[in-house]
Image (cartoon, rainbow, N blue to C red):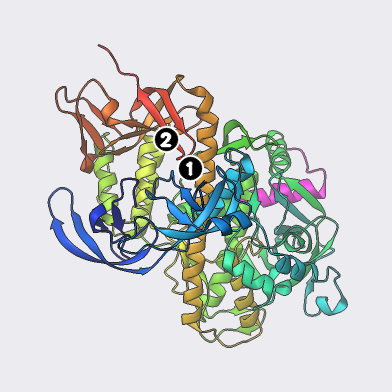
Amino acid sequence: MTREGFIFVIIEGQDDDVFVKASKTRHALHGDTVRVAVTRQKSGDVRRREGEVVEIIERSKKPFVGYYHTVGAQAWVLMQSKSMPYDIQVDAEAGAAMGAQPGMKVAAVVDHWERREPGPFGHLTDVLGVPGENDTEMHAILAEFNLPYRFSEEVEHAADKISDEITAEDLKGRKDFRQTFTLTIDPADAKDFDDALSFKPLENGNYEVGVHIADVSYYVRPGSLVDKEARERGTSVYLVDRTVPMLPEKLCNKLCSLRPHEDKLTFSAVFEMTPKAEIKSRWIGRTVINSDFRLDYDQAQQIIESAAADSAAPADSELNTAIVVLNKLAGILKERERAAGAIDFDRPEMKVEVDEKGKPVRVYQKVSKEANWLIEEFMLLANRTVAEFVATGGQMNGVAQKNAKTFVYRVHGEPNELKLENLYTFAKGFGYRIPTDKPGAARATAKSLNQLLDSAKGKPEFAALENLALRAMAKACYSTDNIGHYGLAFKFYTHFTSPIRRYPDLMVHRLLARYLDNGESAKQDKYEEECRYASERELVAADAERTSTKYKLVEFMQDKIGEEYDGHVSGITEWGMYVEIEPTKIEGMVSVRDIKSDFYEFDEARYRLVGKRRHHQFRLGDPVRIKVKSANLEQRLLDYELIENQE
């Protein structure tokens, strides 16, 4: 729904939505499930279906966030949302009982809106606090996406009751890696360490490399209170200034965190690898480890760079040897994936640094180096190995799988052919030669995409080409139907390596344990439903994370009104163009109404704005200079003004 009151109805499995005028909505609101009748269909350059809502099937349970307001004995939640044009009437007595005071930010759910009523009625779900305070605004974002920001006392109590002692019973059937050199590499500010690598040189010149993952499934039993809460959440959520964990602190920061010099229960994939990263044998099962070192990425990177600077010098410690060898093996694995057609997107990841009060003080680019890739490659290897074992009905640890069994895969389909054609048309406009392979030739398409992006690196149009390539990609999701992972060029892939923060990984651990014990295949329809739900929760969390980043970026720009920046066109619509400024990549909108030099029209097929009188064009990737016009924190919007060439 838009601020103007009209709506777009999204229909599952269809690319085109249905536009509904404000007078034809039957009081449907943002997020509601509705039945819609198509009444008009336009064809031509822009295909648009119009219709009317004939039934509201289900009201959305997602709250709307607004300001609490009272007049006498009546109360309302006043809206300033981009997707909610109507204020919500609520019960004043209930509001007072919850501690709501006029002017406070609150969250409310709409219960009903009858045809002759002037506006919707609902109830408060949370009193968020004083507007402008950091906790209030972050809690408001979580409320907007119906995400919790605390655990109930019952769930905390259930987690606290889980024993933190490891007994002889706990160790039964586990392979003991406590005497094998083991380390963790994580961000410097990480509080939980859910994966570790072990390393042991073998007498035959090969290496034993273990990927050890916290055995969350051993502690969180199916159907328990903690398990139900974890499933409901689906994933941890990472806002700019905080983490909203999937599991209570007792589990994610203590019991299941692979802290150094502590015995920890793990689920592991162990490989014998040659110096050329060829896998001679593999083993998967439950283990116990005791990590020797906790490194952050910078410390690991320093070891890698020191070794590279003086390659003739012998490694002076077990730690250095492990890091250097693991890095070489990871590099070979990475090159192998690239050769197989894995798509290598290299978009800059911008991070917002906040002070102790949550105020943004710096926007900077997070740079991934070899230490990051080292961990990533071994996680990919473990994920792929686990998926392949279940999918192919292979043999592992002496257990032979007769048939493939129901499993949770991480899948990624082939790109949208029409969007790929649009990308190629756009690229040809810059003089790039596109291979003649049809987009449907999957791996050939992946290689041609890599070649295109490689040849555009360092050029002004690179960001635009990469953005269009990303838009052409399917969305990765969870499924019991193994269609492979297109982007990684893997026939088999799952998520095994982060059960602390992703519920699908917990499901993978449980199924894997079952199949290693020769258990029967699980029911596919049940797990397909779980996969669909987990994919939905992942999208909600990603939206909330993006929204918190957008809020902090707008907050960061509030004191920069009137300042000028160089940037490039990052998006084009019929109402204007989006511009990313340098060096922070913060995106804002230049309204087409505010461009004074000409009247510009949107050419959707070529992603450009074209002036009617002077025929000047603005295309994706074009360099521009802008002035910051306004920063709307409530709606998380930045407006830029184009500084035009006055020639």
Q: Secondary structure at mark 1?
A: loop
Q: Dot 1: few (<14), some (14–19), or many (≥20) neighbours within 10 Å?
A: few
**What residue range appears in magenta?**
312-331
In front: 459, or 57?
57
Q: Where does label 1 land, which residue? A: 346
Answer above or below: position of 33 versus 559.
below
Marks 2/1 in contact by CB < 8 Å: the verdict is yes
Relative side of 348 to 54, left or right: right
In front: 128, or 200?
128
Residue, x 82% and y 43% (percent of image)?
316
Residue 542 rendering spot, x and y as whole percentages = 51, 53
**In the image, farthest residue toward the top:** 647
Residue, x 27% and y 34% (percent of image)?
430
Relative side of 472 to 51, left or right: right
Answer above or below: position of 106 versus 503.
above
Residue, x 61% and y 82% (percent of image)?
515
Q: Secondary structure at mark 2?
A: loop
Q: Amino acid at mark 2?
A: Lys
| Mark whose residue sits in front, 2 or 1 | 1
Residue, x 51% and y 53% (percent of image)?
73
Residue 465 rendering spot, x and y as whole percentages = 35, 40
Q: Quadrant of the C terminus?
A: top left
Residue 376 sits inside the magenta stretch: no
In front: 589, or 484?
589
Q: Which mark is residue 457?
A: 2
Q: Amino acid at mark 1?
A: Asp
CA separation, marks 2 and 1? 10 Å
